[in-house]
């Protein structure tokens, strides 16, 4: 009877068959077979073509990756084959059925013409397998972004910010950029034509980060709609971090490998720019309790102590919401652990 590839994967990752999987690997299972299971985690494909893009553009594509196996998996390495490409995993450790993305950034200021680059993603840690992602683009010398992206940097919540990018065209076409398309981003974008001369056309994109933007990282694309049939939509990368007036330290609690029945105590520091009180902590219960009552006096810094009782089995994941007098939106504290046998 011939074992299917899916059966081999099940044997490899089911804990009671670890010794069998180890025997398969030590007896010379082929390199192709060893790589197959990692690529299966990339259900939406392993290639992306950015198409024709302006010189200097900063490009971003996210490859979704899902742990389709019955045990915890770790993305152990993400390696690019070129200095013009950087890549990273948005999250390193994935529980069964959990997803994240491999974020691939391509810098078109570092090449001209066609470019194709591989990115190797290694998954383990007990059995290591690799999959190769590939991104490609065609950089045009006659169209340039200056600078190559909208970069807001770090902005305090409620402050807002504005940045501009010049789009410069030098060619024979009567190129027109008619619209800036913004998806679900807290940004307003305006387009203005700066000049139109024989063989030279200039536009400016003005992007404003709204003062209502929530705290957190912004990293996504807005799009310019052009009259060029070879490049009808051009992506422009937007990056920035909205810094809350409130912060948690640590920002999350990863308890690591624990045993069923363990009783733990952990502390989290809450800081603000103005004196505040902690009003409530939502999500308490189901194995998590406050070790000390909440204080009633205003202060710049408060410490929360939690008693954590680990349940009998399975993955341990909780989310607490810390509400303060300083802002309407709560601070979120994620707590996770892997429960051993």
Image (spheres, grey):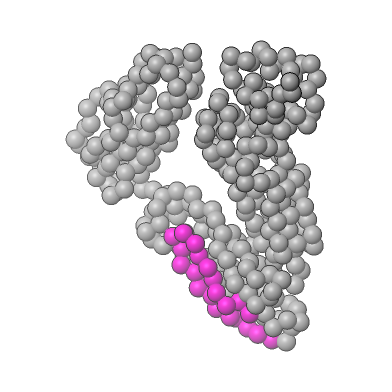
In the image, residue 94 above or below residue 114: above
Farthest residue to the bottom: give it.
Answer: 198
Residue 321 occupies quadrant: top left
Q: Nearer the viewer, residue 156 or 28?
A: 28
In the image, residue 232 above or below residue 59: below
The residue at the point 75 percent across, 29 percent down is 33
- Bounds of the magenta span? 176-197
Give left or right: position of 248 versus 323.
right
Q: Position of residue 160 (x, y in %)?
A: 42, 61
Residue 299 occupies quadrant: top left
Give left or right: position of 138 versus 9.
right
The quarter in which the N terminus is drawn is top right
The residue at the point 41 percent across, 34 percent down is 334
Residue 331 seen in this snapshot:
yes
Q: Position of residue 148 (x, y in %)?
A: 64, 62
Give left or right: position of 55 versus 191.
right
Give left or right: position of 194 versus 50.
left
Residue 122 seen in this snapshot:
no
The residue at the point 59 percent across, 44 percent down is 64
Q: Is residue 293 magenta?
A: no
The residue at the point 36 percent across, 15 percent down is 263
Q: How many marks?
A: 0
């Amino acid at each position: 009877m011939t074992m299917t590839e899916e059966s081999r994967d099940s044997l490899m990752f089911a804990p009671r068959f670890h010794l069998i999987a180890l025997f398969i690997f030590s007896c010379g299972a082929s390199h192709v077979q060893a790589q197959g299971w990692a690529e299966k985690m990339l259900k939406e494909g392993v290639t992306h073509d950015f198409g024709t893009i302006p010189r200097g553009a900063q490009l971003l594509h996210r490859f979704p990756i899902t742990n389709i196996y019955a045990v915890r998996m770790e993305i152990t390495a993400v390696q690019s084959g070129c200095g013009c490409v950087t890549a990273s995993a948005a999250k390193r450790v994935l529980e069964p059925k959990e997803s994240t993305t491999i974020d691939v950034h391509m810098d078109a200021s570092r090449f001209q013409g066609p470019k194709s680059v591989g990115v190797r993603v290694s998954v383990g840690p007990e059995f290591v397998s690799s999959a190769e992602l590939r991104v490609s683009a065609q950089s045009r010398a006659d169209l340039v972004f200056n600078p190559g992206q909208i970069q807001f940097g770090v902005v305090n919540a409620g402050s807002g910010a504005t940045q501009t990018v010049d789009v410069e065209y030098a060619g024979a076409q009567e190129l027109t950029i008619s619209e800036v398309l913004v998806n679900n981003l807290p940004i307003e974008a305006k387009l203005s034509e700066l000049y139109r001369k024989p063989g030279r056309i200039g536009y400016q994109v003005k992007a404003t980060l709204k003062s209502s933007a929530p705290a957190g990282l912004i990293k996504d694309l807005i799009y310019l709609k052009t009259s060029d049939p070879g490049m009808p939509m051009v992506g422009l990368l937007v990056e920035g971090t909205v810094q809350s007036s409130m912060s948690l330290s640590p920002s999350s609690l990863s308890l690591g490998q624990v045993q069923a029945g363990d009783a733990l105590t952990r502390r989290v520091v809450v800081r603000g720019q103005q004196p505040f009180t902690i009003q409530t902590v939502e999500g308490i219960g189901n194995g998590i309790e406050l070790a000390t009552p909440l204080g009633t006096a205003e202060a710049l810094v408060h410490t929360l102590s939690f008693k954590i009782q680990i349940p009998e089995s399975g993955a341990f994941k909780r989310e607490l919401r810390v509400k303060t007098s300083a802002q309407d939106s709560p601070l979120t504290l994620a707590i996770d652990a892997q429960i051993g046998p």
